[in-house]
Amino acid sequence: MTDKEDFIRHTGTDTRAVRGGQRRTMEREHSEALFLTSSYVFESAADMAATFSGEVEGNVYSRYTNPTVRNFEERLALMEGGDAAVATSSGMAAILSVCMSLLQAGEHIVASRSIFGSTTNLFTKYLEKFGVPVTFVALTDLSAWEAAIQPNTKLFFLESPSNPLAEVADISAVSAVARQHGIVSVVDNCFCTPALQKPLALGADLVVHSATKYIDGQGRAMGGAVVGSFAHIADIVGFLRTAGPTMSPFNAWVFLKGLETLSLRMRAHSSSAQYLAEWLEQHPKVERVYYTGLKSHPQHKLAAQQMRGFGGVVGFEVTGGQDAAWRLIDATQLLSITANLGDAKTTITHPATTTHGKLSDQQRDDAGIKPGLVRIAVGLEDVDDIQADLIRGLEAV
Ligand SMILES: *Cc1c(COP(=O)(O)O)cnc(C)c1O
């Protein structure tokens, strides 16, 4: 480690977000360079042989390493407080890469029931096919996590707060149970980002991200990452280099610049979401609001302990079920009707007929997804304008 790198390691998260991981080229560029190159050239045959053998460190091919991607990885690792990070082509590629490198046939996963839909599918449709079964448990029920452990359990997987009902896991407690049993704990930190929550500091072994969401922050590029110890990341890098779901340098550059404003943006998302959640909670046509920043949230204290802000996603149930929810959504003029989140533009969605649409009525009921539930991912517009749009929507209910 150079003196400069060591210096950055001892600065605050926001400083690392702006300064971390940059190695200037001979051109002395101020902003981070974008290396759009698939391969690299050598001085001589001997030089090439030495680099290929690993005797000399250097780039060979961008499926293995790329300077822009490495810059993003180092910056994110510094922000999450991990030894190292590896970037992937999407959030799902990050989760797949964790599974492919850490698990083998005959091993077992325990996962929260409230995880991203594609993650559930990955576990049940594909990993089970290769002999890795999964047991789902309630995110907040610590004894259920412990009870689900089998002698072959290798991985715990969770998201906190959950989407869209904002349930909170006690990350320290769940990670401690995992550690006692030699199980690797993985937290999908997509909704919080390191600006709001640092699962590794709470005891988790690995953090996974969909960089597509808040890390980008403007809905432009797909990407993901895994952060953790040198040993775990080396394993995962091995899979990625071979199988190939690596991050494109262009996307890495977008995310790298996204990290610089991440903390400011998360503060703005959180403060507007807090304002709207408090207002919605008082609204006569709103039955219930799901947001960890509300004092009425059953786990508000725990959330306040392990998070530095409550994020931009707010769920609320309107009176009148699906009809009312759809009328509300259709009456908005500003909000984008889309399932995506983590964008500067506020989005609105109806979980029961979209993200949770494939579930049976019974499964949806068990998951707590009511027909009247609406989810907004609060963006960076003037909060008064977002509120005015929601007022328009609620008038149509
Ligand atoms: C979007 C998302 C993913 C998957 O990320 P992609 O970049 O779309 O592959 C995983 N987890 C959570 C919580 C997400 O919101």
Image (cartoon, rainbow, N blue to C red):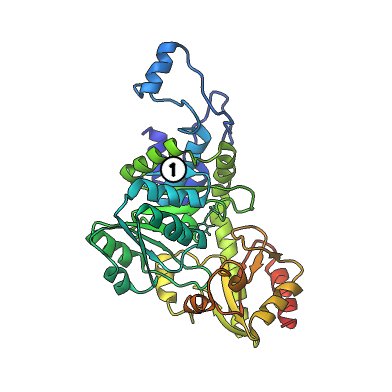
> How many marks are shown on the rendered structure?
1
Does residue 274 appear in this view? Answer: no
Given residues 225 and 325, the one toward you in this image is: 325
The vertical placement of 193 against 5, above or below, is below
**Residue name at image x 33 percent, y 42 percent:** 230
The amino acid sitting under disc 1 is Val
CB of mark 1 near ligand 1 (< 8 Å): no
Q: Quadrant of residue 202?
A: bottom left
User: Residue 85: x and y, percent?
Assistant: 42, 44
User: Residue 184: x and y, percent?
Assistant: 31, 55
User: Residue 71: x and y, percent?
Assistant: 49, 38
Q: Quadrant of the N terminus?
A: top left
Q: Quadrant of the C terminus?
A: bottom right
Helix, strand or loop at label 1? It is strand
User: Residue 101: x and y, percent?
Assistant: 36, 45
Instruction: Specify few, some or many for label 1: CA neighbours under 10 Å numbering under 14, 14-19, or 20 or more.
Output: many
The vertical placement of 322 against 35, above or below, is below
**Residue name at image x 44 percent, y 50 percent:** 96
**Relative to residue 389, is residue 225 drawn left or right?**
left
Q: Which residue is mark 1?
A: 86
The vertical placement of 148 against 155, above or below, is below
Does residue 332 appear in this view? Answer: yes
Q: Residue furthest front?
A: 129
Given residues 107 and 61, the one toward you in this image is: 107
